[in-house]
């Protein structure tokens, strides 16, 4: 029984519950959400500090108490090298969202703080859960708060986008639940740790379960062609919604592959992996081509997420330690970079009143030099410039595809690698095209002066910039944590 | 032969029946008509009956009465109190408490005769408590009618409202037809086996050779009768009009107590009476469940009135409750019971809030709920919680776990297609639940909340507490019904 994971769930949840008290009606203290999410972040940092890096494959900080014996559901939490970076990332991004909100208060602050704190509980819980049903419960917890974030604080088309988001992802969750129940009915336990050690599920059942679980996770990730909820949701969501959606919610899908689908159903994974890889590379190409055609900045970043998640899924599809490592690295890098991109895009939208690239005109570097430079930095990081975090995830995923697991067809994955390589070029193309349109050139004359980056914005963005640099220059900082854990979940697979 | 009757075993229905008579007398002889006092007497009666059940549960033993010894040939017991009986009767009584509270609010304007109302309500509850204990076909059918008959009258008690009369007539016609069908099926079963006792039905049917066609017909006819009670397809058409026409407490009664009684009868007949004929009824139930959840959800999508939406949603929920019954063998019916108990709590809560709103917005359209969060935050949060529960999403964990229990039984029972149909239905259902929930928190017309009824507030509070308890510790339900 370890108190840190429980506290990480309890703090935001209690923080949200306190907001329900009548005395907070209408006047939530400034900085309340900042304080609660700050405590959660401190707990996450403490966990990372106490974490035993010598043995990252082992589940640490475990808590395992029965909750609902009738359903075999145990309140089983823990972290290892795979989940630790994501837990810290979640706590960090939520905290930065509150920093952003402190500088730019929204309407109905009490409701927004409440919603975001419940959202944080669900996100952290998903990464901590070690029981299949508990994972599912936390996976579902995020749906309703995110629905309200989009539907209440979103853009003009928010209603439709929010409904599309929640229906689409619930359909995915329902299929995921069926897959989890198939695993349960075959293996007789819900404990992920025990299941990953070997469970004797027949091959045909594994394929079926992998398809169901994979489809459920792929909606969340999102994988082409199940991504269509994402552009609308991202475009209409407020800045904090987009940041958490891209930075954390998408990771819940890919994390599920690393934690559930691949370790528990290795034979199913081996059978389905070529298809997963194919959809992944189609997603990469599709995402980049769609980006080239976008006029709206936020929508373009949303489609770029489809491409980046394609690389992550390609990494998983190789079923090699290199590829899975790449996927986990790409996960974190995408969370940092795309989080930053959405922050900056939100700031641009606030200042120009639009995110339409044609109406933004050019010359942002001249008019708003700091925001223009940060946008350039984020875009360059996102397109995978060596030396920044975005590079390693893509490069290692392609490298993993170069030498896929023994039971997979090498020529097929070499083809995937080539297509993925073309995708990186296209990615560079659309980001550079966007930058040339928006940041370069002369500012239009008729625009009045605008406020450049504020202190709050800098405070919210700089941690992301620094971490992007850190992981770009020193990828081992992250890979050293994930590698042993990845090798532990791929026992049957060579290399 | 002199039969000894175990009065402790039948104490709960006996108390309810006696209090029903007392209420009618009080209404006639009390000098001033005091609906409040009658309501309190009724409440006391229901609580007393519930106390008796609790005592029986604490005692833990099985009780049986109205037994015929084997020496008379084909012996058996007609009235058995076991865990199943306790859970289903307890559900009916707790629901009864909430419905009596809602009635107190409904009857304040004195246009509805209070004495008759409470008498009929208690009669229906008597039937609902009697039914889960019934272990022979005759008692079962009689108990079912004791539940149904008062409900027509209750629906029609709003004599000044044309829609109520129409609803009552519809309910009456469909119910009578379905009872006739059930009786026909029962008579066939009796003719085939020569026994009315559920325990002896299945062996007798298995032993009897030939006539399998007649058995199928009998099973289908009995199923059809109960399908009406639980508003399963194709006997679901009455739900929309009746729920909207009837007074809100009666709609709640229909959707929880009457439905629970129907399911209790269905489970008794299928799982006890016809357990060896499961291959006959299993596929039928599966198809009916799939059709019911789909029809209910699709019909609910376009509703603009709160009660009609709840009507179709409760049809859809019937489908989810039916689904585990389609799993042949095992103890899958316990999943139905668990779902039913959790469903009762969250659905009653939704009805209680709708009752509270109907006092200020008589038409009770979904748009009347716009901006409720700013006018009456507590009520809005409660309704939002119940709706999310019904949709089966966190924070409504009770609904989520109920669905997981049902899914588990279906998947383990190998009915993959039914699980997929149910998964799709969950998504369809979410659409209208979330659309309603979103209205609560949308900006809406500001206006002071006017009348606040104490009984309704208590009813909402009870439902919230029970649903929260089921959310945090669903084990309460699972261990009771398992």
Image (cartoon, coloured by chain):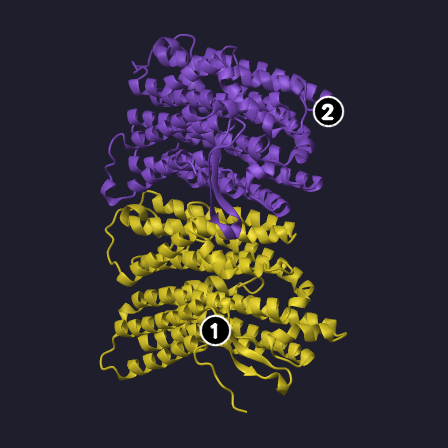
User: Residue B26 at x, y = what percent?
Assistant: 29, 81
Q: Please name the color used to draw chain A.
A: purple
User: Chain for mark 2?
Assistant: A
The chain that hosts pointer 1 is B
Name the secondary structure under disc 1: helix
A238 over A191 or under it: above or below = above
Element class at badge 2: loop
**Chain with yellow colouring:** B
**Residue at image location 51% in from the left, 15% down from the top:** A475
Q: What residue appears at the point 69 percent right and 70 percent down from the top-left corner?
A: B216
Please tell me if label 1 and label 2 are on a single chain. Answer: no
**What residue lies at 24% left-to-right and 58% top-to-bottom?**
B451
Is A141 located above or below residue B319 in the figure?
Answer: above
Q: Is A400 in front, or is B224? A: A400
Tag of residue A409: 2
Q: Which of the two marks, 1 or 2, is nearer to us in this view?
A: 2
Q: What residue does disc 1 label?
A: B148
Measured from the top left, where is residue A114 in percent x and y? Answer: 34, 38
Residue depicted at 57% across the width and 32% down the height: A257
């Amino acid at each position: 029984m370890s108190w840190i994971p429980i506290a990480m769930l309890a703090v935001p949840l209690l923080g949200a519950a306190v907001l329900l008290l009548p005395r907070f009606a209408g006047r939530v203290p400034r900085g309340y959400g900042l304080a609660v999410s700050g405590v959660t972040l401190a707990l996450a940092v403490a966990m990372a500090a106490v974490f035993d890096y010598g043995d990252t494959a082992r589940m640490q900080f475990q808590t395992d108490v029965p909750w609902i014996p009738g359903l075999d559901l145990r309140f089983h939490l823990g972290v290892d090298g795979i989940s630790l970076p994501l837990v810290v990332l979640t706590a960090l991004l939520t905290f930065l969202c509150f920093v952003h909100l402190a500088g730019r208060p929204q309407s109905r602050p009490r409701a927004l703080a409440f919603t975001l704190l419940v959202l944080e509980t669900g996100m952290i819980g998903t990464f901590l859960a070690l029981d299949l049903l508990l994972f599912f419960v936390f996976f579902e917890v995020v749906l309703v708060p995110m629905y309200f974030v989009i539907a209440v604080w979103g853009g003009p088309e928010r209603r439709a986008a929010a409904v599309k988001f929640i229906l689409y992802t619930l359909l995915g969750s329902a299929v995921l639940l069926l897959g989890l129940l198939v695993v349960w009915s075959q293996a007789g336990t819900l404990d992920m740790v025990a299941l990953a050690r070997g469970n004797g599920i027949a091959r045909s059942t594994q394929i079926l379960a992998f398809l169901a679980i994979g489809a459920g996770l792929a909606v969340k990730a999102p994988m082409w062609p199940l991504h269509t909820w994402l552009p609308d949701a991202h475009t209409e969501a407020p800045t904090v919604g987009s940041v958490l959606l891209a930075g954390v919610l998408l990771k819940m899908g890919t994390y599920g592959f690393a934690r559930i689908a691949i370790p528990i159903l290795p034979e199913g994974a081996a059978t389905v992996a070529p298809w997963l890889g194919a959809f992944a590379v189609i997603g990469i190409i599709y995402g980049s081509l769609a980006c080239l055609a976008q006029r709206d900045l936020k929508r373009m970043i949303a489609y770029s997420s489809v491409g980046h998640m394609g690389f992550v899924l390609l990494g998983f599809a190789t079923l090699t330690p290199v590829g899975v490592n790449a996927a986990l690295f790409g996960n974190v890098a995408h969370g940092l970079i795309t989080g930053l991109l959405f922050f900056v895009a939100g700031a641009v939208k606030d200042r120009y009143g639009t995110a339409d690239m044609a109406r933004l005109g050019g010359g942002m570097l001249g008019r708003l030099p700091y925001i223009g430079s940060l946008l350039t930095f984020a875009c360059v990081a996102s397109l995978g410039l060596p030396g920044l975090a975005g590079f390693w995830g893509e490069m290692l995923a392609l490298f993993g595809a170069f030498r896929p697991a023994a039971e997979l067809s090498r020529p097929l994955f070499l083809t995937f690698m080539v297509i993925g390589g073309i995708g990186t070029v296209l990615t560079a193309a659309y980001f550079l095209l966007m930058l040339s349109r928006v940041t370069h050139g002369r500012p239009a004359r008729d625009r009045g002066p605008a406020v450049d980056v504020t202190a709050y914005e800098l405070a919210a963005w700089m941690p992301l910039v620094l971490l992007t640099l850190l992981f770009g220059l020193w990828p081992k900082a992250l890979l050293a944590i994930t590698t042993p854990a990845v090798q532990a979940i791929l026992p049957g697979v060579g290399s | 032969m002199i039969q000894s009757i175990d009065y402790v075993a039948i104490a709960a229905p006996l108390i309810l029946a006696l209090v029903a008579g007392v209420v009618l007398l009080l209404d006639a002889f009390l000098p001033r008509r005091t609906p409040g006092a009658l309501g309190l007497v009724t409440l006391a009666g229901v609580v007393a009956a519930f106390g008796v059940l609790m005592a029986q549960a604490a005692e833990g033993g099985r009780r049986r009465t109205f037994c015929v010894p084997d020496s008379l040939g084909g012996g058996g017991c007609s009235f058995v109190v076991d865990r199943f009986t306790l859970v289903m009767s307890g559900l009916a009584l707790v629901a009864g408490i909430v419905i009596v509270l809602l009635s107190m609010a409904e009857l304040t304007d004195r246009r509805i005769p209070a004495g008759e109302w409470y008498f009929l309500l208690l009669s229906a509850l008597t039937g609902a408590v009697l039914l889960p204990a019934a272990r022979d076909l005759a008692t079962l059918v009689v108990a079912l009618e004791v539940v149904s008959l008062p409900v027509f009258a209750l629906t029609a008690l709003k004599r000044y409202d044309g829609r109520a009369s129409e609803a009552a007539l519809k309910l009456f016609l469909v119910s009578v037809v379905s009872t006739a069908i059930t009786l026909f099926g029962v008579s066939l079963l009796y003719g085939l086996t020569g026994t009315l006792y559920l325990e002896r039905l299945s062996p007798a049917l298995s032993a009897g050779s030939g006539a399998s066609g007649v058995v199928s017909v009998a099973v289908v006819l009995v199923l059809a009768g109960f399908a009406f009670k639980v508003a399963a397809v194709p006997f679901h058409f009455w739900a929309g009009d009746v729920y909207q026409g009837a007074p809100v407490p009666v709609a709640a009664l229909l959707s929880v107590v009457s439905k629970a009684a129907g399911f209790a009868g269905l489970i008794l007949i299928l799982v006890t009476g016809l357990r060896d004929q499961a291959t006959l009824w299993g596929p039928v139930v599966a198809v009916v469940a799939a059709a019911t959840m789909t029809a209910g959800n699709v019909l609910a999508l376009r509703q603009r009135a709160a009660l009609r939406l709840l009507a179709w949603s409760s049809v859809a929920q019937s489908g989810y409750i039916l689904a585990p019954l389609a799993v042949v063998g095992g103890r899958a019916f316990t999943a139905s019971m668990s779902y039913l108990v959790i469903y009762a709590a969250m659905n009653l809560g939704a009805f209680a809030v709708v009752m509270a709103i109907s006092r200020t917005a008589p038409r009770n359209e979904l748009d009347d709920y716009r901006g409720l969060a700013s006018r009456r935050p507590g009520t809005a949060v409660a309704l939002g919680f119940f709706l999310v529960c019904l949709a089966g999403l966190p924070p409504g964990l009770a609904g989520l776990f109920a669905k997981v229990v049902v899914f588990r039984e279906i998947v383990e029972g190998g009915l993959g297609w039914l699980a997929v149909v149910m998964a799709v239905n969950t998504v369809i259902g979410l659409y209208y639940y979330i659309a309603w929930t979103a209205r609560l928190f949308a900006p809406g017309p500001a206006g002071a909340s006017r009348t606040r009824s104490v009984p309704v507030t208590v009813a909402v509070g009870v439902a919230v507490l029970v649903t929260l308890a089921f959310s945090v510790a669903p084990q309460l339900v699972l261990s009771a019904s398992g």
